Image (cartoon, grey):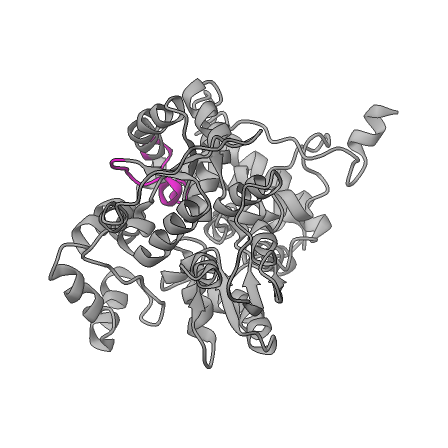
Amino acid sequence: MESDLNSAEGGLEAPTRHPLNWKGADFYDESALFDELERVYDICHGCRRCVSLCNAFPTLFDLVDECSTMEVDGVEKDDYWDVVDHCYLCDLCYLTKCPYVPPHEWNVDFPHLMLRAKAVKHETNGASIRDKLLSSTDIVGKIASIPVVAQAVNKGNELKPVRKFLEATLGIHAEAPLPKYSSTSARKRILQQELKPPKVSPTSQTTGRIALFLTCYGNHNAIQMVEDMAMLFKHNGIDVGMTESEQCCGMPKLELGDLRSVEKLKDQNIPELIGLVRQGYDLTAPIPSCVLMYKQELPLLFPDDHDVQAVAKAFFDPFEYLMLRHREEKLDLEFVRSLSKIVYHVPCHQRVQKIGPKTKEVLELVPDTEVLLIERCSGHDGTYAVKKENYVYAKKICQPVVGRVEQSDAEHFISDCPMASELIEAGMTQGRAKSAFALLRYAYGI
């Protein structure tokens, strides 16, 4: 009976995520890869439940429907890459739609198959200058944040001739929103606060000490958001530390399929993070993708690395952490202002952490506050939306989110991902995105 339940469509057990054996003998074997692509594409073609998630599945189904046999066996193998290129590894198909994920006997893990294909492509062909540039967020951030350089970069990104030039030469779409750089880092802003550490008050699941992995984007682009996050933790009696330095978490390189670079970044970041854990710190980051990288992606890539596994156990989404504290009456509920109605876009990389809408739960602790959820992809997804060939698809994916925001009649619009916020905001007729951290600071009056 148990075997029947496991093999039935949909099953009764939670999905089982297997580690990615990317150092195995046949992982980079292109023939073996194409055999597996054909097998999984055939299953997806017969199901089609994921058609609304991203552009990878419509691309696959169009290829099948337009070929001579109207089956996967009629699709040219070279066209398989078109599907791979539209997958940005959000994981939603695996966790929310697919009825054939393990322990089902068909063992479909579409995102890991796409990651394998990206890795094979990268191993064979390398990466373009544009893709190397876009995925080197730590290096670009450090250079673009140099005083004077930051102002020049920000001004250039606002000028149409400059953007047209970038599109023609690098393939970065002229209309895609690009991040602004600050000549003052988030690390410097936090160090300038000089607040006395509180008396540490642990709970059953938290130490009461949190170390911030600032991330490339948080340290160089979303300065105010990171400062707000630190102030919010400190206001709630949490001892806040941070990494002395960090490299990129590796998510942009992962999305490119450059697994060897992911390993190098892991080797640079994990020693400091595990050191903080051994000092009694829990860990968090302001960007959901970076949290997911340490919670899920690195543990699946390096299952035998005990430090990686220990860091994963110590890593929390910021609002997950606050709610764990609240459950044991360690959260300050003395708010001085309400927040009224908030429309909240939940990023894909937060949804797949399997923690529930913790940002919503924390915000609704503020009296007279209502939070409306939007659980749809924004279409930004790392570097996908800024590429010339993808921007039109990103805008299409984003449009339902824009429509929901503009129809909500809410006082505030937020997303936990500032990059998603920028793309959504670009489609809006009016209004600007805020961060949940900023709203909570306002509610506390700090």
- Give above or below for 197 relative to 362: above
Q: Residue at x 48, y 40 (%)?
A: 292
Q: Residue 147, percent across and down? A: 12, 58
Q: Nearer the viewer, residue 59 or 423?
A: 423
Residue 337 appears in view: yes
Q: Position of residue 127 (x, y in %)?
A: 30, 45
Q: Position of residue 29 (x, y in %)?
A: 45, 29
User: Residue 32 vs residue 161: left or right?
Assistant: right
Magenta stretch: give its range.
Answer: 244-261
On the image, the x and y values in percent for residue 6 come to 78, 30
Q: Is residue 175 above or below residue 310?
A: below
**Residue 423's quadrant in the figure?**
bottom left
Between 82 and 363, the one nearer to me in the picture: 363
Q: Quadrant of the N terminus?
A: top right
Q: Is residue 164 magenta?
A: no
Instruction: Examine the rendered structure and indicate whether residue 239 appears above or below residue 346.
Output: above
Counting every numbered tag in the picture gives 0
Q: Nearer the viewer, residue 250 or 79?
A: 250
> Which residue in the rendered view is the most extreme toward the left?
148
Q: Indicate left or right for 31 with 189 as reference.
A: right
Question: Is residue 117 at all visible to an observer of this figure?
Answer: no
